[in-house]
Image: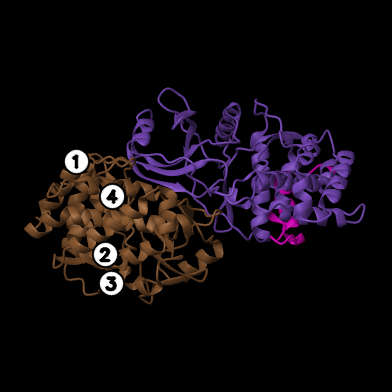
Chain colours: A purple, B brown
């Protein structure tokens, strides 16, 4: 949850003067997203999310994210639509921060997804991948497999302080992943962070995906592997095979996996667990005591890595 | 800003099952209020604020606050209207906390009020006082003058650590206030916390007041004195006499002050500064380092107390 930067009536008036959206009718800071400041802004013409981009989102990457949302929305994928001002500019400046106004989407995210939610989310992810085909811009996955060992080098002390012996287990995982990481899988724009809080439902129907600020180019099946981690485990680390199966089935309604993708899914999921373990581990040490956001527990993902490590050789997660 | 308690789809479904408001269409934790968790909840029938009452709000007091909002709304005052469920109950339980659903109000609060905002806020406060006349319930001001010396006794060490010599100055202020505190002024239900973030405007027109969780019985002019502190000073402590004058003028459009109220206004304002200084001082020490809410700076109110202390004898603030 986060509102790092407070805006006032003068900021709103100055921003809205550039658009044809009328005056502000209400504006609430919302506890959504941990990277940016977000406001639910209602104007005389509609409801929008105003995002002020804070630390960690690199300004150079913003056009990629915004163009991708625009591209997906134009192809019928339900995601926030960036609003252009009268001069056609989407990236604005509010309180000296890059800022953008996107459409507000209705729907409710689920914290405890069941198999039907997972099936819907899987199908939604496939829709996203199909809509993303042909997107002309590229952004490297800066949190991809090639950086994990380097990320871990700087955080080993924290790991052993969190759990005795953790450094040894993670080092072994990193070696396994480096050896087994697949190449040449179908690739394209991926969301890369499609956790339950970034998916909206109306009833049990997938209605929208939000928060494209980790989107990048990578293997499409890796995106599904991220989702398996985020949707098919209990918070205490227990695996929910019915949720995982439903998610893959939902995905394959629209985009059947190739043999290579299917046989890579477990190692991709183990890698996705590593990626979130590592960034949580780093945030765990880097978060100052007075921060507005509580860091997420890296041990949740260490527990998932335990599940992957314990799988008998040749046995897949799904 | 605050969402202390996270709710999920099951909590929403269970809550809304008791009302005739339809299903949840969207739900966002909002960064509003420092005492409670607040959600902007849209259902098929409208928009509401769902509040989960956390620490500091005494459960026994909730019926007073809720009945007062109901009373004021029925008399045309624009404040949140508590929603009763099918059995007529307004106080619900969500995640083991008392909770209430109130109507969502449009409008934007101002962070840098000018004289016209102050005039409007003053008139709005008078509307509130007139609408509150005859309200049958009573709640003592638990942060009134009689408790200040006791509150300060427990926080003297913090005061001198914050600013050398502060304890001596505050002790003198407390003695002056005890000696000069007026009695017998017209009293009734007061808001007691009508800061700019609790007042909404549409354009420059007062549109609503929210957050009645400090409301109590006290001198009506004390409520105006709280507002003078909150609206007529710069954040650095400089006094804005044009804002103060506009606020009193706006108030007197609907409710002219008596001679006794007018001549007490400066000591009441000095007392109001003391009340917020003291609670901020106590929160300053009591807030744990990992808290989601940054404590407000007590020195902002110490600076206001300096202004009052420096007024020549017989010279009023307004």
Q: Label 2: chain? A: B
In the image, the segment drawn in magenta is A231-259
Q: At 42% across and 56% down in the image, what residue appears?
A: B34
Q: Is residue B86 above or below residue B264?
A: below
Q: Is residue B305 above or below residue B150?
A: above
Residue A253 in magenta stretch: yes
Q: Label 3: chain? A: B
Outermost bottom residue: B87
Residue A2 in magenta stretch: no
* Tag of residue B145: 2
Indicate which disc, 3 or 4, sits on the residue closer to the N terminus.
3
The residue under label 1 is B241
Closest to the camera, between mark 1 and mark 3, is: 1
The residue under label 3 is B139
Indicate which disc, 2 or 4, sits on the residue closer to the N terminus.
2
Q: At 25% across and 74% down in the image, what residue appears?
A: B137
Gap in angstroms between the C-alphas marked 3 and 4: 27 Å
* Tag of residue A214: none
């Amino acid at each position: 949850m986060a509102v790092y930067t407070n805006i006032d009536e003068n900021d709103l008036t100055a921003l809205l003067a550039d658009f044809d959206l009328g005056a502000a009718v209400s504006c609430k800071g919302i506890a959504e997203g941990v990277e940016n400041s977000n406001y639910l802004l209602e104007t005389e013409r509609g409801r929008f999310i105003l995002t002020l981009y804070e630390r960690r989102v690199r300004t150079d990457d913003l056009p990629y994210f915004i163009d991708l949302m625009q591209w997906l929305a134009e192809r019928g994928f339900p995601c926030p639509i960036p609003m252009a001002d009268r001069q056609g500019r989407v990236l604005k400046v509010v309180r000296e921060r890059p800022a953008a106004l996107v459409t507000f989407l209705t729907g409710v995210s689920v914290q405890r997804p069941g198999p039907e939610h997972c099936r819907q989310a899987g199908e939604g992810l496939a829709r996203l991948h199909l809509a993303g085909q042909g997107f002309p811009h590229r952004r490297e996955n800066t949190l991809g497999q090639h950086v994990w060992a380097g990320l871990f080098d700087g955080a080993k002390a924290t790991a052993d302080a969190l759990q005795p012996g953790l450094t040894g287990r993670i080092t072994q995982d990193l070696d396994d992943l480096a050896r087994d990481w697949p190449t040449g899988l179908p690739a394209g724009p991926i969301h890369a962070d499609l956790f339950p809080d970034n998916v909206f439902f109306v009833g049990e129907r997938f209605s929208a995906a939000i928060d494209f600020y980790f989107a990048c180019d990578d293997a499409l099946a890796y995106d599904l592997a991220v989702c398996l981690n985020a949707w098919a485990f209990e918070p205490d680390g227990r695996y929910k095979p019915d949720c995982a199966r439903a998610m893959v089935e939902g995905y394959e309604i629209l985009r059947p996996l190739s043999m290579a993708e299917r046989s890579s899914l477990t190692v991709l999921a183990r890698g996705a667990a590593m990626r979130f373990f590592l960034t949580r581990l780093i945030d765990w040490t880097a978060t100052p005591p007075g921060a507005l956001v509580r860091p997420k527990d890296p041990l949740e993902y260490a527990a998932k890595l335990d599940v992957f490590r314990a799988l008998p050789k040749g046995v897949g997660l799904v």
